[in-house]
Image (cartoon, grey):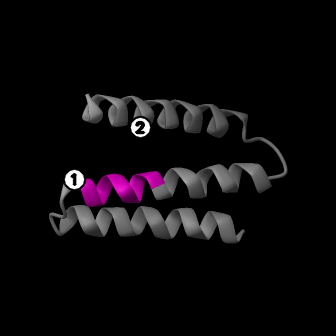
Amino acid sequence: MDEARAVLARLERIEALDRAGSPATVLLEEVRALLAEAEEWVRVEPGGTARAARALDRCAEALGSRKELAIM
């Protein structure tokens, strides 16, 4: 349950930062932290998280791709 609360709190923080006009780099770091927290949440859930796990995999791939593009 703590993992779910962490994810929800992170989402609220991201929304607040976005409303405040925070730089994209700040938002991206928060999204990366959200991804890590969501992965932990999926790991500790007793079941029914296959769809969420697939979505997290796609998000991780997208973030990895963006990071590679930024380096090029």
Q: Image quadrant of residue 2?
A: bottom right
Q: Image quadrant of residue 4?
A: bottom right
User: From which residue to which does the magenta span run?
Assistant: 25-32
The single residue placed furthest to the right in the displayed view is 46
Name which residue type carries label 2: Leu
Identify the residue shown where x is 56% and y is 34%.
55
Above or below residue 12? Residue 44 is: above
Above or below residue 48? Residue 62 is: above
Quadrant containing the C terminus in the rendered view:
top left
Identify the residue shown where x is 52% and y is 50%.
35
**SS state under label 2:** helix
Tell me, yes or no, whether the two marked residues, 2 and 1, touch with CB atoms within 8 Å: no
Above or below residue 34? Residue 69 is: above
Q: Position of residue 23 (x, y in %)?
A: 18, 59
Q: Position of residue 19 (x, y in %)?
A: 20, 65
Identify the residue shown where x is 37% and y is 57%.
29
**SS state under label 1:** helix
Magenta stretch holds residue 28: yes
Quadrant containing the N terminus in the rendered view:
bottom right
Looking at the image, which is closer to me, 37 or 66? 66
What main secondary structure does the magenta stretch of the protein show? helix
Magenta stretch holds residue 70: no
- Tell which circle, 2 or 1, labels the residue nearer the N-terminal end: 1
Q: Which mark is residue 53?
A: none
Identify the residue shown where x is 64% and y is 49%.
39
Name which residue type carries label 1: Ala
Q: Which mark is residue 63?
A: 2
Looking at the image, which is closer to me, 12 or 29? 29
The residue where tag 1 is placed is: 24
* Badge 1 density bin: few <14, some 14–19, many ≥20, Cα 10 Å: few
